[in-house]
Image (cartoon, rainbow, N blue to C red):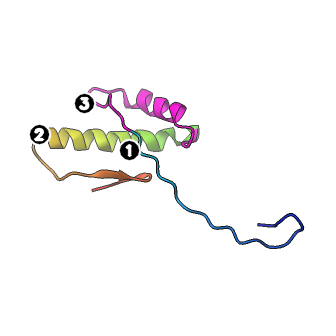
């Protein structure tokens, strides 16, 4: 990156995390609509990421179903990934 006078500048990037509580996620939730709602309401997630949000919601929904039936270990969302 170039500075004000054309000099080279070092730029450091970091990953930011935002926890989003999804209270309406059930086995019968419309994941596409919910993914669109999340990207609309959270300004940190660009609307082009609806597909990724949908995938993460599906994985969370599957986890909740698995836990409700007594199987599987817990998982959590870490950044844009679900960590099991």
Which image quadrant for residue 78? Answer: bottom left
Q: In this view, does 2 lie above or below 47?
A: below
The residue carrying pointer 2 sits among few (fewer than 14), some (14 to 19) or many (20 or more) residues within 10 Å by Cα, namely: few
Answer left or right for 22 relative to 62.
Answer: right
Q: What residue is disc 2 on?
A: 69
Q: Could you say whether the residue bearing mark 3 is in a helix, strand or loop? A: loop
Answer left or right for 49 relative to 28.
Answer: right
Q: Distance between the residues labelled 3 and 1?
A: 14 Å
Residue at screen point 36% across, 26% down: 30
Residue 65 % position (x, y): 20, 38
Q: In this view, does 11 lie above or below 42?
A: below
Q: Earlier in the sequence, mark 2 or mark 3?
A: 3
Q: What residue is disc 3 on?
A: 27
Q: Write the start and end of the magenta stretch as one range.
A: 21-46
Residue at screen point 41% across, 30% down: 34
Q: Which of marks 2 and 1 is nearer the N terminus?
A: 1
């Amino acid at each position: 990156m170039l500075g004000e006078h054309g000099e080279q500048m070092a730029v450091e990037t970091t990953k930011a995390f935002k926890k989003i509580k999804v209270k309406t996620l059930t086995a019968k939730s419309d994941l596409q609509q919910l993914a669109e709602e999340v990207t609309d309401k959270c300004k940190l997630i660009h609307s082009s990421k609806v597909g990724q949000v949908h995938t993460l919601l599906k994985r969370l929904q599957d986890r909740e179903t698995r836990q409700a039936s007594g199987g599987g270990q817990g998982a959590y969302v870490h950044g844009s990934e679900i960590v099991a």
